[in-house]
Image (cartoon, helix red, strand yellow):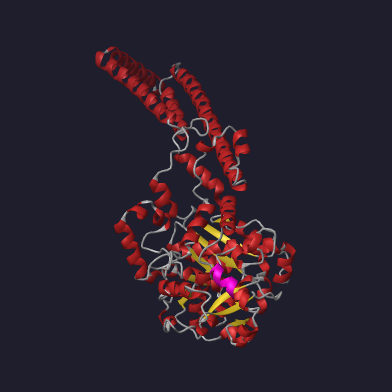
Amino acid sequence: MEPLNHKSFERVVSQKALQMGNSFPCQICVVGFLCGVCLTSLFMAALTSFGSFQFSPILFSTMSMASNSSGNSTFPNDINKVTRSDCQFKLKETERLEDSKSSREQNNDERVSLLYSAWSAVLNEPTSGGKEHLQKHGISGSSLPHAPHLENCKVKTQLYDYFDKRKGNEVFPPWTTWKGSLQTFPVAAINEQMQNLRHDAVSEGAYPPWIAGSDEENYPLTRKVQRDIWIHQHPLNCSSPDVKFLVTDWERLPGFGIGAQIAGMCGLLGIAINEGRVLVTNYYNRAEHGGCKGSSRSSWSCYFFPETSLECRRHAFELMKSEDAWSKGIVTTKENYTTKHIWAGPTPRKWGLQWNYLQPTTDINGTLLASHRKMDIRWWRAQAVRYLMRFPTEYTCNLMNEARHASFGKLAAEMVLQSLAGDWPKESSGRARSNDIDEYVWSNHKPWVPRPLLCMHVRMGDKACEMKVVGFEEYMQLADRTRRHFPHLNNIWLSTEMQDVIDKTREYSHWNFYYTKVRRQAKINMSMAAYEASLGRETSTNYPLVNFLMAADSDFYVGALGSSWSFLIDGMRNTGGKVMAGFLSVNKDRFW
């Protein structure tokens, strides 16, 4: 009975279902259901076309459930066929888009390399402008975009020379409140009111243009001190019997690095100031190489503007031949003073005890170094090194151009090409004509580097006999500390003599490291003198000075106060508008 009743029940249900299926409302419901399935399919396909392939399993699963509920219908098979062909079409379309993108990237890389090599040619052949290379690649000089990371060293040096000489009998050079090339704008020579304003500014004691930032952004009284040192070193009449001289060679003992040489000369400048003498530097052994040409060979003036005028130098050297000048003490040399006097002699006090007002911005172990017993030397060396390095020469400017181009040139090329409207060099209407604002206002801006930039001087090797030497990891901890406060900081300019330090940078992939390409020490017990000798005189002088100037201009600095090099870099920064950037040191200094 049970099976019979079950069959009877099925027949009744089937009949009812047939009646309902033949009814108009039911037909409407079925059509509505099928339309809903179609709309759902189209909706899911639309999502898939936007690249959301993760929705495909959901689409396929949904359609399978619909086919199972429809018995033997062939509709689901058709849907599967359409979906597969649709996916294949979209995959091919995506492949074409990826191929197109890859082609564009390859083309862009080629353009970046072409622009970088064009700038390299101009940089290496400044007189010809790299014409042969440009012509070879179908580039006209007028269509070559401006290189934002390079300076026009010849023009820049001419401007520095303009700022380092007096006009007639004026007490100061033409220093005014205007910056850079704006001083030379032609209206100044025509406009009488402008001439009077300039004269008044000069008469009132305009500040020297090599100081950046306000008084609050530098060591106390920096602008006045720099102005007064220049006046002291450039007397109106060098031949006056009242003018005395201190003529000296730079220290040349093998154990003296560049930092020690500069520190010693800072001491001698202090002696000259205290005794009312004009300091005249003579033989500089590190400039005795083929890169320093003519009269600048074996002279500080190969790298930076001389410490005094040419007239004073000539007169001082004439006096050295006079026994009367020696007997009257009109001229003295380094040998007239003891080592202690040079290195730890009295700091010039004509400006008062300004070191008592130094801002505590040096961090050691998380604590600011407020004071120590050699604050006067720290203040004075900062003033002295700033004066001695006030203006780089054309030779040094070119060294900096080469270093920036090697490190940042391709980044600059990418940036410039992104800013161009056309497909350079194919679509180029030529370089825009230079305007007054380019020449007189914007020319004063510093060359581009990726900012913010942190400079790090890692001193190891034989320095262990003089100070506490720490590993690269501790320097990086201080860099990470800086980054936690400035999360947009990604770039480090690294200065070190150790190859091991360079190798360890691979462990810090979240930083961008830049450094000069020079052979470094492989052995930790190698002396600095032996290492420099292995590099040769020119390389061992050029690359440290490049690192020094990069550090002076960087946004942040990590080093070791126990290193005289770091000590001097810190001073250069604190007279260059960087006081409030601070200095993170891995050790305490030796209280020089």
Q: Quadrant of residue 259?
A: bottom right
In this orientation, which residue lies closer to the viewer: 252 or 298?
Answer: 298
Quarter of the image that includes the C terminus: bottom right
Give left or right: position of 375 versus 313. Answer: left
Q: Position of residue 77 (x, y in %)?
A: 48, 19
Q: Quadrant of residue 227?
A: bottom left
Q: Nearer the viewer, residue 17 or 140?
A: 140
- 243 relative to 325 in the view: left or right: left
Front in this rendered view, residue 329 or 24 = 329
**Is 311 in the magenta?**
yes
Give above or below for 106 relative to 260.
above
Between 148 and 438, the one lying in front of the other is 438
**In the rendered structure, does residue 524 fall within the stretch colored magenta?**
no
Report the side of 368 relative to 19 (left or right).
right
Q: Residue at x 50, y 56 (%)?
A: 158
Dominant secondary structure, magenta:
helix
Could you tell me residue 139's position as x and y percent?
56, 34
Question: Looking at the image, which residue is at 44% across and 56% down?
Answer: 488
Quarter in which the N terminus is drawn: top left
- Quadrant assignment, res 206: bottom left
Residue 60: give x, y in percent of width and height: 46, 28
| Outermost left residue | 25
Determine if residue 538 is in view. Answer: yes
Residue 486, position as x, y percentages in the image: 43, 61
In the picture as drawn, the residue positioned furthest to the top comes out as 22
In the displayed structure, 554 sits above or below 361; it is above
Q: Is residue 447 left or right of residue 217?
A: right
Over which residues does the magenta segment extend?
309-315
